[in-house]
Image: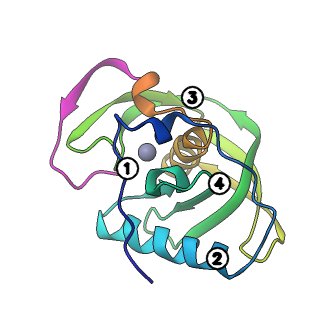
Amino acid sequence: MALRQVRLQNEDILRKKCREVKNFDDRLAQLLDDMAETMHSYNGVGLAAPQVGILKRVIVVDIGEGLVELVNPVILDSKGSVTDNEGCISVPGLAGKVTRPKWVKVSGLTRDGEQMIIEAEDLMARCLCHEIDHLDGILYTDKVEGDLFEVEEDED
Ligand code: ZN
């Protein structure tokens, strides 16, 4: 495993649309391992591949209930809405209020290419939506309500 360099808000790569993963090989496994290590090193709760410079539809999320890896994730359904503070490893030191679904149902593939379905609510739903947005070049700052504010640098 290895830490990867995190790309920041002003870098064009964070605005690109990511490609679907077709090969479930050692390179994908290495990417997932490195993403989890990088996320944890920042005390983050989620990370998307473009944040480490890879334009593939791959995310990792860990809100303290175990690591979740998802390849080619798709939001199938959502319900409700919650407005809460959100941050991003690519936007260090800042946070802002964003409205997200309270509940989501997400499909995706494991690192071995097996189908999986996740139903999540509250923080986990927020993280999944935030990371899946990254795969389409969308940052939470695009959706923020009101002004960004400064926080200690250990947010997601
Ligand atoms: Zn982010």
Callouts 2 and 4 close, C-beta under 8 Å:
no
Mark 3–mark 4 Cα distance, whole angstroms, equals 28 Å
Task: Classify mark 3: helix, strand or loop.
Answer: loop
Residue topped by disc 4: 56
Task: Classify mark 4: helix, strand or loop.
Answer: loop
> Residue 66: x, y in percent?
52, 73
Quick check: which quadrant has ligand 1? Answer: top left
Q: Counting other residues with Cα less than 10 Å from the Cα at mark 3, is it few (<14), some (14-19), or many (20 or more)? A: some
Residue 117: mark in rendering: none
Mark 2–mark 4 Cα distance, whole angstroms, equals 12 Å
Which quarter of the image is occupied by the N terminus?
bottom left
Q: Of the residues shown, which amino acid type is indicated by label 1?
A: Arg
Location of residue 74 with respect to 113 vertically, above or below: above
Front residue of 18 and 133? 18
Q: Counting other residues with Cα less than 10 Å from the Cα at mark 1, is it few (<14), some (14-19), or many (20 or more)? A: some
Task: Classify mark 1: helix, strand or loop.
Answer: loop
Of mark 2 and mark 3, the one earlier in the sequence is 2
The quarter holding residue 104 reads: top right
Residue topped by disc 3: 81
Mark 3–mark 1 Cα distance, whole angstroms, equals 29 Å
Of mark 2 and mark 1, the one earlier in the sequence is 1
Front residue of 96 and 93? 93
Residue topped by disc 1: 7
